[in-house]
């Protein structure tokens, strides 16, 4: 059944603050957090498999994926890359929708001063 | 402090599959690490480096929160910390949005104890639409049509992770604190018509329904998807609550319709104008002799510029536009200006509060800090 709902936004309204003079560093921080998350997910998944299956490391080393399994893995890696490097896409997304975000501090001021 | 016990499952909650859960678990771990290991490290950085660098340039120590900020902003570790802290906040939402998104339209309960009244003509105040508070993508207002509960599902999971589980398996620690405070202060008061304004998904609403089972309990919020989730959740827990889509600044209820009007962690997310209108509306909605109780972040302590500096970071870096101004307000004076005669301020201290205070957990002063309870009485 097709999902009737449009996708949810992945990025919060409001400009992302800059913490480093060199913006690449903030991007790298996000990427590292994303990677750490994925590594943690994998470690949990492995632990689950070991618990449930009792399959040893030799059998894992001998295994070669067939075409269908290769396709599944490729799709999974693509999704992983999109998640880990979301910082780059977000920035493009922000540029595209820049007009919507307005100026964060102008909004804070309007809220603090009771204009809205 | 954290609590590893999993959040209590219910019909509307979306945990997702194995990897969604593992991603949420990681966001939980990282958030706790940020608040318990890195945040206290900021004080170390200040004492070991930032303070001296400031003194070398200015001939004295930084004193005000703004001067502390200037000193800290120059420190490379601190900048890296801020950057990672922001990313950890984003990691929470990145973990909980996808399983919520996959929910699709949720069927509403057939024979509910309570009810759900949505009103598409309700317009959200500008402060809700302008910025997504605490960086939650889509904010409180995201509504993709009939049966959409995703914003509620995202908020429900996000609160649990953000608060390191200290809100309890039902995310209701703040509501329970509010109920306990009212019962301690007014042991003979048995409200029969209770209104929870800005109820969200009902985390603080259900404790009122539990404590006063004979009362008619109503929750209002602007977010339709939050309210659908709230309705499903209350029914799943067997509690009858009336959820109504309404703006707390101008509700559809007649004068004097309630004998208790309450809110939990709502006022700091409004605006100076919104807050004043909400207090005025609470006054109008209360019957003579009625009680108003708001629980929220306490005012800043002028004797603790370090804590103020840390707390103001929520406005600087976590999309909390009103937080900073709110905490400089004299709420008792605001309540009096809204027409309340007798006003009492109280402090509610608990583990969950310390987590949300964003304070140095090793500072002994943090122990005695708590949420602010604003209790006010409408003249009889
Ligand atoms: C931090 S949440 C707290 C939700 C709930 N009280 C709890 O304790 O979990 C703030 C809530 O206030 C609501 N809110 C803010 N301004 C409002 C207004 N003017 N009218 C109705 N609801 C409002 C938001 O939609 C959001 O659900």
Image (cartoon, coloured by chain):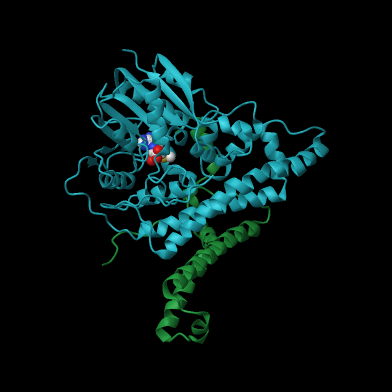
Chain colours: A green, B cyan
- Can you say whether B68 is above or below B347 in the image? below
> Considering the image in quadrants, where does the N terminus of chain B appear?
top right
Residue at 61 percent of width and 58 percent of height? A29
Would residue A10 appear left or right of B38 to someone viewing this image?
A: left
What residue sits 42% from the left and 78% below the top?
A72
Assign the C terminus of chain B to one quadrant of the image.
top left
Q: Where's ligand 1: which quadrant?
A: top left
Quarter location, residue B328:
top right
**Nearest the camera: B61 or A111?**
B61
**Would you say B35 lies left or right of A2 here?**
right
Q: Position of residue B69 (x, y in %)?
A: 67, 39
- Residue A81 is situated, as x and y percent measured from the top left of the image, at 52, 69
> How many labels were placed on the picture?
0
Left or right relative to B84: residue B61: right
Which residue corresponds to the image point at 48% horizontal and 85% vertical from the top-left? A63
**Which percent across, then down, holds residue B280?**
37, 23
Name the image quarter holding residue A70.
bottom left
B85 to B55, vertically: above or below: below
Q: Is residue B349 above or below residue A18?
A: above
Residue B359: percent from left, percent from top: 59, 38
Quick one: B53 or B178, which is closer to the camera? Answer: B178
- The furthest residue to the left: B111
Q: Is residue A50 left or right of residue B244?
A: right
């Amino acid at each position: 059944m097709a999902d009737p709902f449009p996708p949810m936004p992945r990025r919060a309204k409001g400009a992302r603050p800059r913490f480093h003079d060199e913006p690449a560093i903030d991007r790298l921080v996000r990427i590292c957090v994303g990677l750490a998350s994925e590594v943690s997910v994998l470690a949990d998944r492995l632990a689950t498999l070991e618990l449930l299956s009792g399959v040893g490391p030799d059998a894992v080393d001998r295994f070669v994926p067939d075409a269908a399994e290769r396709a599944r893995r490729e799709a999974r890696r693509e999704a992983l890359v999109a998640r880990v490097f979301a910082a780059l896409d977000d920035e493009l997304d922000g540029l595209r929708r820049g007009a919507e975000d307005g100026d964060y501090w102008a909004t804070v001021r309007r809220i603090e001063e009771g204009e809205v | 402090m954290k609590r590893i016990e999993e959040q209590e499952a219910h019909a509307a909650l979306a945990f997702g599959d194995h990897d969604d859960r593992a991603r949420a678990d990681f966001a939980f771990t990282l958030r706790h690490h940020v608040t318990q290991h890195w945040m206290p490290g900021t004080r170390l950085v200040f004492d070991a480096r930032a303070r001296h660098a400031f003194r070398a340039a200015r001939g004295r120590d930084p004193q005000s929160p703004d001067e502390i900020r200037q000193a800290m902003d120059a420190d490379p570790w601190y900048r890296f910390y801020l950057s990672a802290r922001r990313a950890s906040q984003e990691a929470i939402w990145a973990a909980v949005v996808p399983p919520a998104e996959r929910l699709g339209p949720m069927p509403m309960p057939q024979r509910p104890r309570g009810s759900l009244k949505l009103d598409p003509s309700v317009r959200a105040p500008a402060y809700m639409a302008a910025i997504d508070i605490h960086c939650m993508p889509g904010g409180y207002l995201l509504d993709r049509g009939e049966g959409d509960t995703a914003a509620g599902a995202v908020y429900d999971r996000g609160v649990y992770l953000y608060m390191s589980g200290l809100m309890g398996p039902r995310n209701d620690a703040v509501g329970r604190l509010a109920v306990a405070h009212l019962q301690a202060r007014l042991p003979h008061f048995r409200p029969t018509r209770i209104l929870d304004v800005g109820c969200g998904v009902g985390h603080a609403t259900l404790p009122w329904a539990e404590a006063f089972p004979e009362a008619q309990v109503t929750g209002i919020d602007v977010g339709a998807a939050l309210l659908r989730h709230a309705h499903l959740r209350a029914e799943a827990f067997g509690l009858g609550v009336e959820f109504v889509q309404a703006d707390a600044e101008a509700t559809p209820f007649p004068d004097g319709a309630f004998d208790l009007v309450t809110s939990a962690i709502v006022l700091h997310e409004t605006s100076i104008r919104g807050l004043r209108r909400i207090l005025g509306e609470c006054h109008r909605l209360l019957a003579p002799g009625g009680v108003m109780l708001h629980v929220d972040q306490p005012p800043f302590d002028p004797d603790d510029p370090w804590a103020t500096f840390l707390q103001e970071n929520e406005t600087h870096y976590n999309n909390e536009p009103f937080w900073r101004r709110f905490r400089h307000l004299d709420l008792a004076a605001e309540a009096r200006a809204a027409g309340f005669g007798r006003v009492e301020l109280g402090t509610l201290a608990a583990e969950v509060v310390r987590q949300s205070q964003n304070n140095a957990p090793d500072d002994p002063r943090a122990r005695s800090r708590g949420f602010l309870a604003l209790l006010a009485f409408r003249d009889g």
